[in-house]
Image (spheres, rainbow, N blue to C red):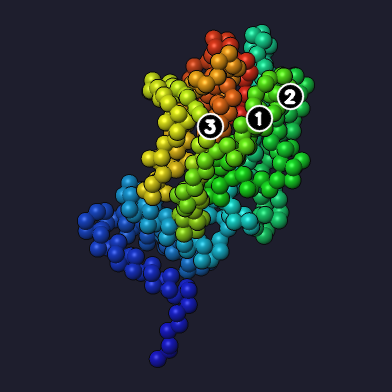
């Protein structure tokens, strides 16, 4: 009799069979056709030249797409699929949405594949319109070019990966400068200071870390002081002025959730709160809720840090800051009198910037144009801020 060899492929195959058997038993309680049908369908519909482990991975993937409403099965299938991909050292992980296929770079960081190029022409047109509104009301305007995890660096990309994400940002920057719109280019800062830009991001998520949020707040403050002779306190952003509370392995980001923590690993999450005295009022427009008290009372939501949120699609540990995205948030700093008022146009990256930037303004209003349906131009004219800080690529069409 031929001796059975315990290779990793055989072990995975055995585990796959065991998983099917367990699913079969559970199917009598839950949804038999979805559980076994999904596993078998993904396996059998794989191309003939697909190796066994990849077929097994496709089985888990199809299973998950049909079982997402069963939370426990969703977690099991996502992690099982990711574990198989990790064993075969696959760098590009298939997804039902090609825009969200996950790519593991050679430095271990995850990023989205991004199959479409980025055209910023319409954003440029909109910013020029916003500039005219600001000029008419004697308001300063500054655009911030954010950093992205996307890359065309061949040293970071897997071998033979034909990746060429393109953006016409260079043309946008030239147009903005020609129209006297001030620009803070974070990529330029990274290049000038020889910073590893990936150290500014979570490994499993497309967002900046909270420490990066403080760093960006300092860059914005320094830029505003230099451009407009503001007297904002840049020293406020020395990390020694903050308590840093690290929650280890508490966060699985947007990219990690699509492949599971057995493939991606997990990130630590820092909750960073000021050591100095704070007194704030935070109004969330959509709900009308007003939070009053310290930075911790109004900004930090520790209830979002829970193991249940690792694979939760609706809430993550990142939502610890400002409870995630809102169309309009108005932050009042009661420790500042006769100070500046700023309007920050942001997306989800701003969740770790706005809390710290607000410490230098009497009022910081935050608008997310992905959900804000009123006119931004009308809001600017109504509130008349000292400066509009545009840190997003979204724009309004009217």
Residue depicted at 52% across the width and 21% down the height: 335
* Depth order, front residue of 49/72: 72
Question: In the rendered image, which quarter contains the N terminus?
Answer: bottom left
Q: Marks 1 and 2, how far apart in space?
A: 11 Å
**7 up-or-down from 295: above or below:** below
In the rendered structure, which disc, 1 or 2, sits on the residue that comes first in sequence?
Answer: 2
Residue depicted at 63% across the width and 48% down the height: 199
In the rendered structure, which disc, 2 or 3, sits on the residue that comes first in sequence?
Answer: 2
In front of the other: label 1 or label 2?
1
Kindly identify which numbered label has been placed on residue 391: none
Q: Residues within 10 Å of mark 3 (few under 14, many from 20)?
A: few
In front of the other: label 2 or label 3?
3
Q: Residues within 10 Å of mark 1 (few under 14, many from 20)?
A: some
User: What residue sits right under mark 2 in the picture?
Assistant: 226
Locate residue 382, reporting x and y percent.
Answer: 54, 9
Res 206 quadrant in image: top right
Q: Secondary structure at mark 2?
A: helix
Residue depicted at 48% across the width and 77% down the height: 7
Res 215 quadrant in image: top right
**135 up-or-down from 114: above or below:** above
In the rendered structure, which disc, 1 or 3, sits on the residue that comes first in sequence?
Answer: 1
Q: Secondary structure at mark 1?
A: helix
Q: Kindly tell me whether residue 253 is visible in this rendering.
A: no
Question: In the rendered image, which quarter contains the C terminus?
Answer: top right
Residue depicted at 59% across the width and 52% down the height: 109
Q: Residue furthest bottom?
A: 1
Kindly identify which numbered label has been placed on residue 234: 1
User: What residue sits right under mark 3 in the picture?
Assistant: 276
**192 up-or-down from 53: above or below:** above
In front of the other: label 1 or label 3?
3
């Amino acid at each position: 009799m031929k001796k059975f060899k315990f290779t990793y492929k055989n072990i995975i195959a055995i585990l796959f069979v065991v998983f099917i058997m367990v699913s079969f038993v559970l199917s009598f309680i839950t949804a038999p056709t979805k559980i076994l049908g999904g596993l078998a369908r993904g396996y059998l519909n794989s191309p003939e030249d697909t190796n066994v482990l990849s077929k097994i991975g496709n089985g888990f993937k199809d299973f998950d797409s049909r079982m997402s409403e069963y939370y426990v099965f969703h977690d099991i299938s996502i992690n099982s699929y990711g574990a198989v991909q990790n064993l075969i050292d696959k760098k590009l992980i298939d997804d039902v949405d090609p825009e969200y296929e996950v790519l593991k770079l050679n430095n271990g960081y995850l990023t989205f594949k991004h199959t479409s190029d980025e055209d910023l022409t319409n954003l440029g047109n909109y910013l020029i319109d916003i500039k005219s509104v600001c000029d008419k009301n004697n308001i300063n305007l500054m655009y911030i070019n954010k950093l992205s995890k996307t890359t065309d660096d061949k040293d970071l990309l897997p071998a033979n990966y034909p990746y060429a994400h393109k953006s016409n940002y260079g043309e946008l920057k030239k147009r903005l400068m020609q129209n006297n719109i001030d620009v803070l280019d974070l990529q330029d800062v990274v290049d000038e200071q020889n910073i590893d830009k990936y150290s500014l991001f979570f490994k499993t998520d497309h967002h900046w870390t909270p420490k990066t949020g403080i760093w960006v707040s300092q860059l914005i403050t320094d830029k505003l002081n230099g451009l407009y002779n503001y007297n904002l306190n840049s020293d406020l952003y020395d990390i020694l002025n903050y308590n840093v509370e690290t929650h280890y392995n508490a966060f699985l980001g947007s990219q990690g959730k699509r492949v599971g923590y057995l493939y991606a690993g997990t990130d630590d999450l820092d909750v960073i709160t000021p050591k100095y005295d704070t007194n704030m009022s935070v109004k969330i427009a959509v709900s009308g809720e007003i939070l009053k008290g310290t930075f911790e009372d109004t900004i930090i939501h520790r209830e979002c840090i829970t193991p249940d949120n690792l694979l939760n699609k609706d809430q993550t540990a990142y939502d610890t800051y400002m409870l995630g995205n809102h169309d309009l948030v108005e932050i009042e700093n009661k420790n500042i009198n006769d100070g500046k008022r700023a309007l920050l146009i942001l997306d989800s990256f701003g969740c770790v910037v706005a809390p710290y930037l607000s410490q230098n303004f009497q009022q910081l209003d935050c608008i997310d144009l992905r959900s804000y349906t009123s006119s931004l131009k009308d809001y600017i004219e109504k509130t008349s801020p000292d400066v509009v800080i545009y840190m997003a690529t979204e724009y309004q069409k009217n």
